[in-house]
Image: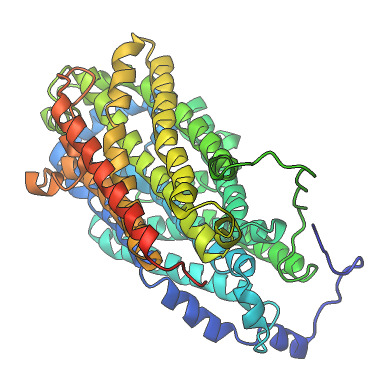
Amino acid sequence: MTAVLGTAPARRPGPGALRRHLAGTAPLLRLALRRDRVLIPVWLAVITLMVLSMPNTLRQVYGTPEKRADLVASLTTNPTLRAFYGPVFDQSVGGLTAWRVGTFAGVLAAVMSLVVVVRHTREEEETGRQELVASAGVGRLAPLTAALLAALVANTVLAGLLAAGLAGEGGTGALALGLAVGCTGMVFAAVAAVAAQLTESARLAKGIAAAVLGAAFVLRAAGDAATKDGSSLLTWFSPVGWVEHTRAFADERWWILLLSAGAVAVGCVAAYELTGHRDLGMSFLPSRSGRAHGRLATAGALARRLQRGAVLGWSAGFLLAGGVLGGMADGATDLVGDNADTRAIFRRMGGHAGLTDAFLSAMVGIVAMVGALYVVSSVLRPHGEETSQRAEPVLATPVGRLRWAAGHLVVAFAGTALLMLCAACGFALGHGEDAGPIVAACLVQVPAIWVVGALAVFLYGLSPRLAPASWGAAGAVLLIGWLGPALDVPRAVMNLSPFSHLPKLPGGDLAWTPVLVLTGLAVVLTAAGLAALRRRDLATG
């Protein structure tokens, strides 16, 4: 039910009233940074390592101006690659770094920012903690201000790290790229601030902000595919496209940052206006009333109802990603050309089959590693239900803990297989070849994703405090799979990821031993986690 205060426009507060509304902002900011003392540094480390590792990789693979010129020529004529990475504005190592990871760094900064803002606004209201904080004389606007300032601190540090780390490629270009990435993060912090006012659910607020981010990425991709120089109007309507329009390391356009600043200002004003016109804990989008006679007779049905939106959204994303990456496969040979170093990287990622198969295998592996993020999110849904104390009314009925948790785990692990099937359909449609090998390549990744999810079950079963560490495990898997082959890290490090033990399909031989071992490991970890959950006390908040 929606409750909105004031049908007439609110009167502009004077200086004294504004101070009262912002009372307690500094302590709340310190609290937010303390609570995120692990979350924010992990995000910063992942994004920074991804960006700063790229110049050395590019020097190894495209060490001469001739090789870089050939790469740029191939990219200019390939609309699929332009849609995925964007156009190249300069063939220097710095320019290629901005092309290769600039957009993705902006997207990751946006995800970090929306998570931080929703965590300290709508999530606090949803759990009831904000009501306790408000009773201590904290101003009406203080929580939102503290959340935005926490995102500002994170993005400022990120911009500084990128600028300092890339300074050797050119100080001006490094500063431009760092500021562009940080500003993108702040744009979506403002988007998340608005989304947090619209809905009563933190999960839905994140979904709204993530949908805006996805739409921005699609606009940018469509615009870059249509033009060779990024001049399409579609990219100008996308905050993600503003990263490339800054043209770091290539005649920088500093005024583009004003677009981000304006978008942040508009979003923040809208969020402050909305938060001043609603009751604490309420929203502007009404919650749908349930049926008078519900049909959710089991814990499994409740779990499916709670998670169906996430499963459908992830499935659509995997289908789209598979289609885009599958369409890039035929251009892989033209992109790589005679570059032996690039061929070696693809073969470390995708096996020693033909280059097209190696490329497909590498891309399937990357999509599967992203699937590890889904399975952790889905497995930890009971953690959110428990800490918000919504699990107590369910467990007060004859439903036991194992049945309650098992309903969510069935959705998580079955959903993983569904996601990879959707990705296989996308790859098959995009590549246009025999679907059988692609389907096998995607499904063989499922046991490795299950291992990451089973580790999350084990940590959550031991203690709710350990559950967030599951995100660190998923991030480490992504980092190893993304950077390991390019940097040719030792095999012992690569073996820490379950994905490194799987057969490289399509093109390779299907070995059942690692598939069965990983499946068994997932079963053992899940059983141990459920046994621990059955024995421990529930969280009290």
Closest to the observer, 497 or 238: 497
Occupied quadrant, residue 421: top left
**Furthest-top residue in view?**
434
Q: In the image, what residue occupies the spot 58% across and 42% down?
A: 298
Occupied quadrant, residue 87: top left
The x and y percentages for residue 363 are: 30, 30
Q: In the image, what residue occupies the spot 73% across and 68% down?
A: 275
The answer to whether 381 appears left or right of 369 in the picture is right
Seen in the picture, residue 264 relative to 415 is either above or below; the reply is below
The x and y percentages for residue 427 are: 38, 21
> Does residue 412 appear in this view?
yes
Is the image coloured rainbow, by chain, by secondary structure, or in one colour?
Answer: rainbow
> Does residue 64 appear in this view?
no
Q: In the image, what residue occupies the spot 68% across and 77% down?
A: 141
The x and y percentages for residue 116 are: 50, 64
Closest to the observer, 212 or 536: 536
The answer to whether 242 appears left or right of 357 in the picture is right
Occupied quadrant, residue 294: top right
The x and y percentages for residue 247 are: 42, 47
**Furthest-front residue in view?**
398
Closest to the observer, 373 or 267: 373
Q: In the image, what residue occupies the spot 16% across and 36% down?
A: 501
